[in-house]
Amino acid sequence: MSTDPNRATAAAILPLVGGPDNITSIAHCMTRLRIGLRDRSLVDDEALRTLPAVLGVVEDDTYQIVLGPGAVARVTPQFEALVQEGRSPAAPAAPHPHTHPVTADGLADRGAALKEAQKARNSTPFKLFLRRLANIFVPLIPALIGCGIIAGLGGMLTNLGWLPAVVPALAAIASGFLSLIAVFVGHNTAKEFGGTPVLGGAVAAIIVFPGVAKIDAFGHSLSPGQGGVLGALAAALLAVHVEKWCRRWVPEVLDVLVTPTLTVLVPGLVTLFGLMFLAGEASAAIGAFANRLLDTGGAFAGLVLGGLFLPLVMLGLHQALIPLHTTLIDQSGHTVLLPILAMAGAGQVGAAIAVYYRLPRNRSLRATIKSALPAGFLGVGEPLIYGVSLPLGRPFVTACVGGAAGGAFVGLFHQLGLSFGSTAIGPSGWALFPLLDGTSGMGATVAVYAGGLTVGYLVGFAATYFFGFTSQMLADLNTDPDPTPDAVAEPDKAPALT
C-alpha cells in the first residue's frame, strides 16, 4: 500500500467510482475532483462519503467529489495516474450500508431528491453556457490567488517600510500574470469551444500588445489592455468560428497555411476596430456599476447580494459572476463583490452550528456537521449546504438570512467610504483574509471583513435556532436514527449528507 496519503486517497476513490474503465474525463477546480462517468450506477455513494478525505459529493454535468482546497490539487494527479495505469488498487473495505450509522432516512432522501431535481433543472442551454464560461476562468484561479497574496505581501512591506529593494520584485511577480490574463482567457476560450487554443491566445494577445496605442478606432487611440478579459473572450470566440469555417471550406492542401492566418487576421482586425472599444466600454460600465451599487446602495445592496448568493449557488447561476469578478480584478486589482458574497458562507456556518445544538440526540447529523464545519469556516460550503441546510429546508432559508446580515454589515462600510475587495476569486471565509485589499489600510479592511463574518455567524445561528425548525421537525429529527452499539462506537465516522 502506498505511503503517500494523496495516492492512498486516490486509490480509495477509484474503485468506488467504478474503476478506471468507468472514467471518461478527469478535472478539478478549487475544491472538487470532477469525474466523467460511463455508468453512473457503478458508483458507491455511501462508501465514498465515509472516506475521511471526502467532504461530500455533488452531481452536476460531472460527478464531483469535494476534497477541499489544496487537497484536490494533490489528489487529482495521483488519481489520473492510477486511471492511466489501468489498474484497480485495493481500496479500503467499504462498510456495508447496514453496518454504519445512517443519518435520518427522510433527510437523506430529500437531499438526494433535491440534487437530482437540481441536476435536471441545470441542464438548460443557458446554464450549460454558464458552465462553459466557468471552465474558461476556473483554471486561472490558482494563479490569481498566488499573485494576489504576493501583491498583498508587497503592499504590507510598503506600508511597514520594510525591504524596499524587494518590493518592486514582488510587484513584478504579482502583476505579470494580470498583465497577460487576456492571453490565458483567449487560450482557454478556444479550448473550451472547440478551437485551437494557441490561436485563441494569439488573437487575445493583440489586446495587451503595447503597439495598439498607435491605432485609432472610433476617433480615439486604443490603450493596451482596453477591453480586458471581456474583449479577449469575444475575440477568441470569433476566432473559433472563423477557424471552424476554414476547416470546412479551405482545401486540405492549403489548410495548414490559410486557416491559422485567417483565424488570427480576421478576428484580429475585428478586435482592433470594434471589439476592444466595445468591450472596454462594457468593462468600464461593469466597474462603475459595482462601485456605484455599493457606494449608494450600501447596506441594502449588501443585504440583497449576501442573502441571494446561496440560492444562486444552488441554481448554478453563480458561475455568471466569474467573468464579472475577473473583469473587476483586471480593472482595479480587486473585486468588491466577493467579500460581500462570502458572507453567505458565514450564514451557512452559523445555521449549521444552530442545527448541531437543536438536535442533540441526532448523533449522525451532528457528526456530519462536526466534520464539515472546519471546511465551512474556510469557505468550502458544499458539505453543509447539501448535507445539512438544503435538505432540511428551513435552515437553508435562515442561513440566507445570516448571509444577508453579514452582507449588509460590509455594504454599510462601503457606503461610509471603507471600500475593499479580494485580489482573487475562489476562496472565501477565513481563507479570504490574505487576499483582501482596500483603500483604508489593511487593519480597517480586516476588521470590517471579520466583523461581517461574525455578524453572519451570529445571525445565521440565531435565525436557525429560533426559527429554523417546526415542532414536528424537531420531533422527527431529534432522535438517534440507529441507537445500536455499532452506530455510536465511532460517531465521527458517520457519512456526510452530500
Image (cartoon, grey):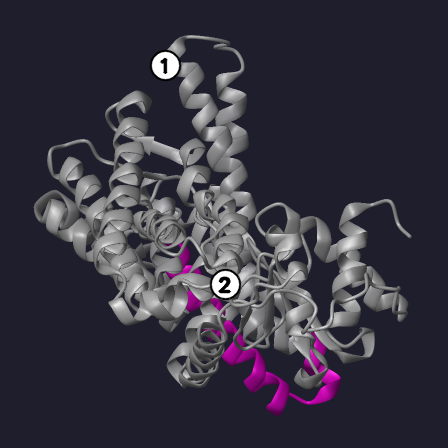
Residue shown at 12%/43% (left/top)? 295
Residue shown at 19%/49% (left/top)? 302
Amino acid type at image mark 1: Asn
**In which quadrant of the rendered view does residue 16 lie?**
bottom right
**In which quadrant of the rendered view does residue 355 lie?**
bottom left
The label shown at residue 480 is: 2
Task: Using residue 405 as the reference point, say whether residue 44 is left or right of it.
Answer: right
- For label 1, the residue is 159
Report the predominant secondary structure element of the magenta stretch: helix
Residue 354 in picture, x, y percent from top left: 34, 50
Pointer 1 or 2: first along the chain: 1
The stretch in magenta equals 228-256
Of residues 233 and 296, the one drawn nearer to the viewer in this rendering: 296
Q: Is residue 211 above or below residue 304?
A: above
Of residues 239 and 172, the one drawn nearer to the viewer in this rendering: 172
Q: Nearer the viewer, mark 1 or mark 2?
A: 2
